[in-house]
Amino acid sequence: MFEKALKGNAAYWTWITFLAVLAGAGIHGYRIQSEEGLASTGMGVGAVWGIYNAQLPFLAGLAASALFILVPERLMKRSELSAAAPLSAFLAAVAAAMSLLFIAAGLGMPSRIPGLFMNMSPSAPASWHAPALMAYLVLSLSAGWALLASRKKGTTPPRWLRAVVMLAVPVGFALPVIAAFMLAVMPTYGLWTSAMLAPRILVSGLAAGMGLLMFMVVAMRRSAGPDEGKELVERLAGYTALAGLASLFFIGLDAGTAFLGNLPSETYALRLLYSDMAREALPAAYAPFSLLPSVLLVAGAVSVALLLLPVVRRTGGMLAAAAGLLIAISAWFDRGPGLILAGQASPDGGTVYAPAMPDMLVTIGIWAGGALLLTALLKVTISVRRSREAL
Amino acid sequence: MMHKNTLIGLVIVAMLAAAAYLATGAETRDASPAADSGTADSTVCIYPKEYMQTHHMQVLADWKEHAAHEGPDAFMKTPDGRRFQKDLATCLGCHDNNRFFCFSCHNYANVKPNCWNCHISPQDLP
Amino acid sequence: MRKAGLGLIAGLGAASGILSNPLFERVSASAWASSPKQPGRRWGMVIDTRRCPEGCTTCLDACRRSHNVPTFSDPRRQVEWIHKEDGRALLGTACATKQAIPALCNHCAEPSCVRACPTDSIFRRKDGIVAIDYHRCIGCRSCMLACPYGEVSFNWSDPRPAIKEPTPEYPTREQGVVEKCSFCSDRLKKGLEPSCSSQCPEGAMTFGDLNDPKSAVSRLLGSNETMRRKPELGTEPSVFYII
Ligand code: SF4
Ligand code: SF4
């Protein structure tokens, strides 16, 4: 089936080449990093975790979001979601694979990666992170592949798939909890010790996952021709809007608690994100980016508002797709860099993290690698659909 | 279809079992060392020479684990009743008459153990 | 000595309601009797800040030398097992002195660093020492973020070239692992006291078994008001300061 990913038109190959070049740049960045040590990155005393770890909470939520499609579709016989099921499983698999790569990229001793699986210490939440991601990667990839294979043959999906999905439920819901608890053991960082952290990661991941899924389904309809996907887009748009709304509500709850309680660490991090403070705290070259958090927050909120309009959901065209994508980007910043990088900044001064060349390249490279994998899987999905239509 | 899947499942189970066996194999062999007939002093190694020639890596890996985690409580008792503090310094303390002790073999076999990334190699000493 | 296990003292005392001000802790014989039993040793240290003169770095130098701790000039790459910091910053506003006083890993009884480590590379030993297995650490730096006192350092680059006066008896670390104070567990094994406390010319650092009521540290805790760093976090440090 995979050979389908190797056939495509010029636009497809241009996109693949573009991603491959970026991934290559990431490999180059990693070479610099492994030769010179993490000293070559923007990390250091005061900014102990950088942009690698900053991807992990978001990706954990994104991976878990697939359960909201797979469980109703497989276990509750909601066949209207069938067209989205393989896509969401693949999205989860890609998120899990990228998380594993980001974990590996941030280690000082990559040669000891097996230790992550051999020397687990059950009382440390971080111990469960890599094994859970690994299990989830296998489960979601096999679920997506089996769904696609049965679609291709026109048979009903195999029975064991139900067991796979049932197994994926605890593992998938554990991901945001692990991502939150591995931060909760760090008592001095206010943003990380909130009990809202796990639900916020889950809900933002859900909004992002549904938004991306909607984007992919709309894109697929444009390339593979409209089929049963119309109600699907409307449904996904509804999920995205609701999850986005919940996410905004949670942001408000956390911010309200922080400012009403005048909690020093939390208010500092929030002001760093959403006021002019970042302009001074960041190195001069990064000053233009100090507005990014506010812009993304507003963009996300506007997109949620748009998707709440029934017209937009029903039309389900490019506007809805763009809103879904924007919500995903906004959620990424909120539960990614915004949480980790701003959350670890200390009110007692000290450095604010800003990426250097190697960590920037590696991050872009891993995202490109994820996009490459997703593109290939999407291509296979589209070809399967096309070949079915030709029958 | 069903048959193929059962087969794949069996293969995976077999592979897991093999991996588990390989992962534990080395240690189970360690636990039953050959008896040492030497006198109760440090002129004789903790295990017979032949055993050490083939298994010193496993012994060192075990010592390393215990020394790091138990510190002063990490002792080893040989079958003939001698007690050794598990510590690389214990090994090097006996084998200090030949500063090429580790290296002549390792160089010959082109083995590069990572011990000396941190521990100071006898060859680096004046 | 060990079986007495009369336990601690101060922070535990807070739980048994013998302290009016949780910032200052005093140990009394009745508190020992009522505190929960902690069998075995618990190594600890009492630092008398009144005796520690400004500008003295004897303990810092002794530590750096005896454990091959690298010296990096860039503050963002710094590695240290013990350092001196302004008393207010260290112990909070209740501490009157603004003079620099020594700070090191507190070998907490409830260490957050240990709960953060995915590979069990940093762990609490039976004798109360929080130790790192440098053979196992994967360099994820979770422990650095989890330690509320910033007492864990990371080797951002190869430490060997940065070691000023190498000591062949002790190993170095390598690029990509964390390191911190070990309470000189290597010296304790040989029956020696830690480098810092044994070399302090003013006798400002006292090392010993906190669980032994007859030890010098226990006696100091009984006769002085002491403070610990961030006691409100419940990490139960084993390093005490006399102001
Ligand atoms: S002071 Fe920090 S590193 Fe030391 S035991 Fe306590 S939490 Fe861990
Ligand atoms: S840096 Fe090493 S010791 Fe610290 S948490 Fe990670 S693996 Fe454990």
Image (cartoon, coloured by chain):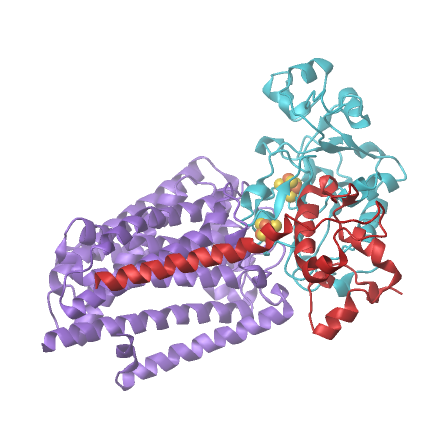
Chain colours: A purple, B red, C cyan
Residue A179 visible in rendering: yes
Q: Residue A38's image quarter? A: bottom right
Count of labels shown? Answer: 0
Residue A321 visible in rendering: no
Quadrant including the C terminus of chain A: bottom left
Instruction: Between residue A149 and residue B45, name the one nearer to us.
Output: B45
Q: Is residue C113 left or right of residue B17?
A: right
Q: Which residue lies furthest to the bottom in this view?
A: A10
**Could you tell me residue C58's position as x and y percent?**
86, 46
Taking the spot 75% from the left edge, 57% from the top edge, the residue there is C172
Q: Residue C86's image quarter? A: top right
**Could you tell me residue C36's position as x and y percent?**
62, 20
Q: In this view, does A227 lie to the left or right of C171?
A: left
**Could you tell me residue C230's position as x and y percent?**
63, 34
Q: Is A67 situated above or below A254?
A: below
Taking the spot 74% from the left edge, 32% from the top edge, the residue there is C241
Taking the spot 53% from the left edge, 61% from the top edge, the residue there is A106
**Could you tell me residue B37's position as x and y percent?**
78, 49
Quadrant including the N terminus of chain A: bottom left
